[in-house]
Amino acid sequence: MPRVFVTQAIDPAGLAVLRDAGLDVAEHRGERPIGRGPLLAAVKGCAGVIPMPTDRIDDAVLATAGLRVVAHHAVGYDNIDLEAAKRRGVIVTNTPGVLTAATADLTLALMLAAARRLVEADQLMRAGAFAGWRPLLLRGLALDGARLGIVGLGRIGRAVARRAAAFGLQTVHCSRSDKPDAGIERVDLETLLATSDIVSLHCPLTAETRHLIDAAALARMKPGAILINTARGPVVDEAALVEALESGHIAAAGLDVFEDEPRAHPGLRALPQAVLAPHIGSATVAARRQMALKAARNMVAALAGDTPPDRIA
Ligand code: DGY
C-alpha cells in the first residue's frame, strides 16, 4: 500500500479520499509546521507528500527514494523546486481556483480595515479612550471613487477587482499576462504606483517579483496611499515598508503575508496603521476543505498513473 505523508493536519474530507483510495496516510500533528529534519525523515519510504506553503520542497526532499508525487496543499508554489522535480521525474500539483473567493474576500477585509483604521479604532475602544463622537476622529480613506491598482491580474486579482467595483473603486492593473483584462485598464507599474490610492499585490513570488515593492517603489507611491499584500511576503521589502509607514508617506498597510514568516517585522507590530493577519487568505471552512480535496484527488490520480487535474510539473 503506497504511503503518503501529509505535513499538517488538513480537512478530514481530504484524508478520507486518500484512505478510500487504499493509501497508507501519515500526518504531522502539532501546532507548528514540521521542522526540516523531521520532514526529511518522514518522507522516507513515501510515494507521495502533501506539503504546505511552510515546507521547503527542494532537491533534498525530492531526491527521497521512491517519492513520485508532491500534491501541494496551496496554489502558490514558490516553496517547491519545480526544476528539480522535473529533473527527478516527481509529479507536482497545486490547488488553483478553490481559494480565489476566500483570498479576494480577505483582501477586501484588509483594504477596508486599513482604509477605515479599524485597528486604531479597536485599540481606542479597548483602552476606554473613546471620549465621544468627534468630526475629526479617525478619518480614513473613502473607497468610493478611490483608485485601486492591482499588481497581477490572475484569478485572485480579477476576483478582487469584481468586489472592488461594488465599493466604487476605480481599478487599474499591471500584469505580465496577455489574457484579456476583463475591461480593466492596464497601465505600467510606474503609473500604477504613482496614481493608485490603494495598491494590492496578487503576483506570484518569483526572482522578478522579490522586493518588487522596495524603498524606491514605495517612494513612487502616492503620499497617503495604502498597500495590501495577500500574495507572498517577500514581494515587499518589509523594513522599507516600516520606514514608509513611520514617515507617514504610506498611510496604512494590510498584510496577510510576511517576508520572514511566521515572523512579522517588529516595526510592523508596533504600528496600528498596519493591519496584520497570519496568512489566512484561504482560511474559510469551504476553501480549506476544497484545497484538501483537490490535493488528495491530485495525489490519488497521480499515484494511479493518471494525469492529475492540477499538474504543474
Ligand atoms: C496559497 O494557496 O498559496 C496560499 O498562500 C495559502 O492558501
Image (spheres, rainbow, N blue to C red):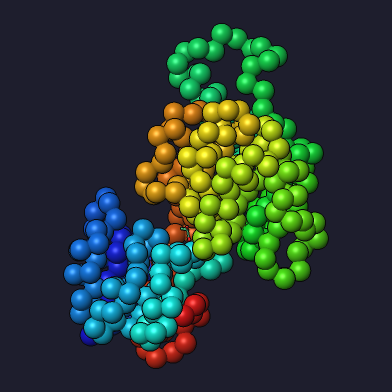
Q: In the depicted view, which residue is nearer to us: 53 or 56?
A: 56
Single out the residue that lies furthest toward the front. 216
Q: Estimate the x, y position of residue 232 in percent, counting from the top left.
A: 50, 54
Picture quadrant where residue 198 is located: top right
Q: In the depicted view, which residue is nearer to us: 279 or 286?
A: 279
Q: Residue at x 37, y 47 (%)?
A: 262
Q: Estimate the x, y position of residue 222 in percent, counting from the top left.
A: 71, 37
Q: How many marks?
A: 0
Q: Is residue 232 left or right of residue 203?
A: left
When the figure is inspected, residue 204 is found, relative to residue 87, above or below; the finding is above
Single out the residue that lies furthest toward the bottom. 305
Res. 187 visible in picture = yes
Q: In the depicted view, which residue is nearer to us: 83 or 287?
A: 83
Q: Is residue 74 left or right of residue 193?
A: left
Looking at the rendering, in which quadrant would you find the N terminus?
bottom left
Res. 106 visible in picture = no
When the figure is inspected, residue 175 is found, relative to residue 268, above or below; the finding is below
Q: Residue at x 56, y 32 (%)?
A: 245
When the figure is inspected, residue 298 is found, relative to residue 132, above or below; the finding is below
Q: Residue at x 48, y 22 (%)?
A: 123
Q: Residue at x 52, y 40 (%)?
A: 240
When the figure is inspected, residue 275 is found, relative to residue 174, above or below; the finding is above
Q: Estimate the x, y position of residue 65 in percent, counting from the top left.
A: 24, 83
Picture quadrant where residue 93 is located: bottom left
Single out the residue that lies furthest toward the top. 131
Q: Estimate the x, y position of residue 207 in percent, counting from the top left.
A: 51, 63
